[in-house]
Image (cartoon, rainbow, N blue to C red):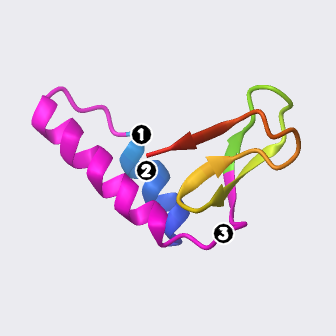
Amino acid sequence: MPLQYVAEVVSGLKLDDGNLNTWKNGVVRIIKRYIKNGTESKNTCEFCGAKLVYSEGCLKCEACGKYSKCG
């Protein structure tokens, strides 16, 4: 399974325990470091609707540049 999908699945987990949420966020942050720059995500930009891409461990919109989310 490609790393970007693993990161998206883990980040989408709904955990009630605060300790598990902290663990989840840490795991996602580490996984994202190993996703190649330019890899497309299934997520889209909330401003222009373009596909988001991974860059330096963050999800960014290369089309309009208005969206960026790290961690």
Disc 3 and disc 2 in contact, CB within 8 angstroms: no
Above or below, comparing residue 58 to residue 3 in the picture: above
* 12 left or right, relative to 61: left
Residue 68, picture quadrant: top right
* 38 left or right, relative to 64: left
Please, what secondary structure does the residue beneath circle 2 have?
helix
**Three-letter amino acid code at disc 1?**
Gly
Structural crowding at the residue carrying mark 2, measured as other residues with C-alpha within 10 Å and reported as few (<14), some (14–19) or many (≥20): few
- The residue at 46%/66% (across/down) is 33
Measured from the top left, where is residue 45 in percent x and y? 75, 35
Q: Which tag, 3 or 1, sits closer to the chain's start?
A: 1
Say which mark, if any, is on residue 37.
3
Structural crowding at the residue carrying mark 3, measured as other residues with C-alpha within 10 Å and reported as few (<14), some (14–19) or many (≥20): some
- State how far apart marks 3 and 1 are (Cα): 21 Å
Please, what secondary structure does the residue beneath circle 1 have?
loop
Measured from the top left, where is residue 53 in percent x and y? 71, 55
Residue with the mark numbered 2: 9
Q: Report how many numbered discs are placed on residues in the image.
A: 3
Q: Which residues are magenta?
A: 13-41
- The residue at 48%/73% (across/down) is 34
**Three-letter amino acid code at disc 3?**
Asn
- The residue at 23%/32% (across/down) is 15
Residue 29, picture quadrant: bottom left
Measured from the top left, where is residue 46 in percent x and y? 74, 27
Say which mark, if any, is on residue 12.
1
Above or below, comparing residue 71 to residue 29 in the picture: above
Q: Is residue 57 magenta?
A: no
Please, what secondary structure does the residue beneath circle 3 have?
loop
**Three-letter amino acid code at disc 2?**
Val
Nearer mark to the viewer, of 3 and 1? 3
Q: Which tag, 3 or 2, sits closer to the chain's start?
A: 2
Disc 1 and disc 2 in contact, CB within 8 angstroms: yes
